[in-house]
Image (cartoon, grey):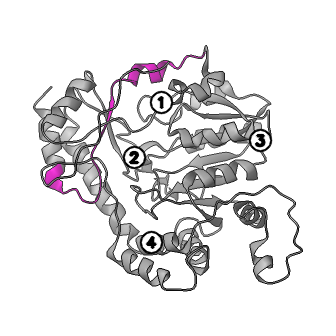
Amino acid sequence: MKSKIKDMPLMEETDENIVMFYPHVPEASKKSVLDTLNSRWIGQGPKVKLFEEKFRDKFSPNFSALATGSGTDALHLAYMLADLKPGDEVVAPLFTCTATNIPFLYMGVRINFADINLDTMNIDVRHVRELMNSNVKAIVCVHYGGLPCDMDELNEIAQEWGVPIIEDAAHAVGAKYKGKDIGSISEFTMYSFQAIKHITTGDGGMLLIKNNELLSKAERLRWFGIDRSAKQGGIWENDIIEIGYKYQMTDIAAAMGIESLSEFDETLKLRQQLFKLYESELKNIEEVKIIGANSDDREHAAWMFTIAVERRFELQNKLRDHKIESNQVHFRNDRYTIFEEFTKGKVFPNMDKIENNYLVLPLHTKMTFDDVKRVCNVIKSGW
């Protein structure tokens, strides 16, 4: 199923306009980048290692952390570390950024796409259970917008079939599920530090790995298959036995990440306050359904605020007329030709119901509480 409706163009940044996204770059990050540029190490060096250690200590102290050049790099490494082979199958979400699923096409892994839960737009655990079979070697879930998936139910299915869960937490740094940090639950969890995420390194990613014995392999795969520490120590035997990639983070990026991490709690708190104000302002509007509302057993990371409404295009046009940007950010993957082999003839009734109705509203640290109220007042006035 392919939508023929085009997205609206990006809105120009002006004093009057409320744009959807804006990078959050701490002042300390700028100084740290300059210091790094004046140092010996601007590629992968000591700051990458320090960023890994600080990130691990904050979100999952008993796991290993691996910094990468992008979230997609981290996902691809996770899929390889999970020992996925050509012909293996995975269960993965239909509704997600294509980055979640494109690495499977590199690897010759077959995708069993799962429908969404209408209340959260996360993966529907009932459909996951229906899709499981002996060829499925992993379950992939995405915490859409920053709201954790139903991890207890997914873990139950994964344990029944003896397969790992790989969490795409690109939206969900700082999220919690039943008091546990996302990143401290499953075998693998990926984070994104792309330009407009909570933490940005320009672009970048982090992979948290439950089995610490896999770290040395992950580090080799991240750098051409070479044992980097042995090479730098002069004890490398100058042989490559695994096909690796150039997926490492640089110290320039890590310098940004370290400083962003140091003020992350304040960043997360502001985003969550803006999110809750949206909820408060819109909760009694009959025409508006808030995606991911009323999830008391998990903590939303508030990367995106998504609503579902009838006549979404009319609302989007009205918001644009009032100098407010809104759009759909991610899409069902069966709209893309590259996945046709795995989607042809398949039906996804929940995705069909909401496909033209969901809309993402502005949410970023440049916004004020008055900005949120301005957006909500336009919505309340009808469309």
From mark 4 to mark 3, how far is it between C-alphas?
Answer: 38 Å
Q: Say whether disc 2 or disc 4 marks the residue closer to the N-terminus.
A: 4
The alpha-carbon separation of the residues under discs 4 and 1 comes to 35 Å
Q: Which stretch appears magenta?
A: 346-371
- Mark 1 falls on what kind of element? loop
Which one is nearer the viewer's eye here, 325 or 43?
Answer: 43
Q: CA distance from mark 2 to mark 4?
A: 33 Å
Describe the element under mark 3 as helix, strand or loop: loop
In the rendered structure, which amino acid carries the disc numbered 3?
A: Gly
Residue 298 as seen in the image, left or right of residue 222 = left
Choose the circle earlier in sequence order: 3 or 1.
1
Look at the numbered discs 4 and 3 and tell me whether their residues touch, using CB distance below 8 Å.
no
Q: Amino acid at mark 4?
A: Met
| Residue sitting nearer the eye, 50 or 241 | 241
Q: What residue did someone put label 2 on? A: 296
Q: Looking at the image, is 17 positioned above or below residue 27?
A: above
Q: Earlier in the sequence, mark 1 or mark 2?
A: 1
Vertical arrangement, residue 21 with respect to residue 48, above or below = above
Give the spatial CA distance, label 3 vs label 1.
24 Å
